[in-house]
Image (cartoon, grey):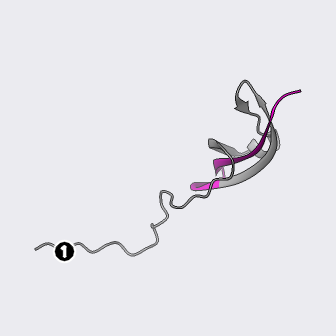
Amino acid sequence: MQPEVNQVTVFYYDSDELLTLKTALLSDLNVSNDRVILPQGFRHDKIIVAVCEGEVKVLNALGDRVDQEPARLQFA
């Protein structure tokens, strides 16, 4: 029997929405040669960036502040 990983957080880009980094929490996955085996149905149309052990909470990511007003610089 192959070992299992209780939970992993997967960071990925959807092929339909390449500008938004997404995450998914997956449970009870098999491990082979120290690599987590993601289900083929999950991997379809995704670019997998990272697989992290456990539940990961993203606090900030690239592009989070794109919609905010730019900072105003003042020079003396």
Picture residue at 89% right of the left edge, 27% below the top? 1
* Majority secondary structure of magenta residues: strand
Residue toward you, 19 or 56: 56
Pick the quarter of the image with the C terminus: bottom left
Name the residue beneath numbered marker 1.
Answer: 74
Picture residue at 72% right of the left edge, 24% below the top? 33
As drawn, is 54 to the left or to the right of 73?
right
Q: Is residue 45 magenta?
A: no
Crowdedness near tag 1: few (<14), some (14–19) or many (≥20) residues, C-alpha within 10 Å: few
Residue 68 image offset from top left, x and y in percent: 43, 73
Segment colored magenta: 1-22
Q: Does residue 29 lie above or below 71 as drawn?
A: above
Picture residue at 84% right of the left edge, 28% below the top? 2
Picture residue at 77% right of the left edge, 31% below the top? 31
Residue 43 image offset from top left, x and y in percent: 74, 42
Q: Classify residue 19 by image quadrant.
A: bottom right
Residue toward you, 29 or 15: 29
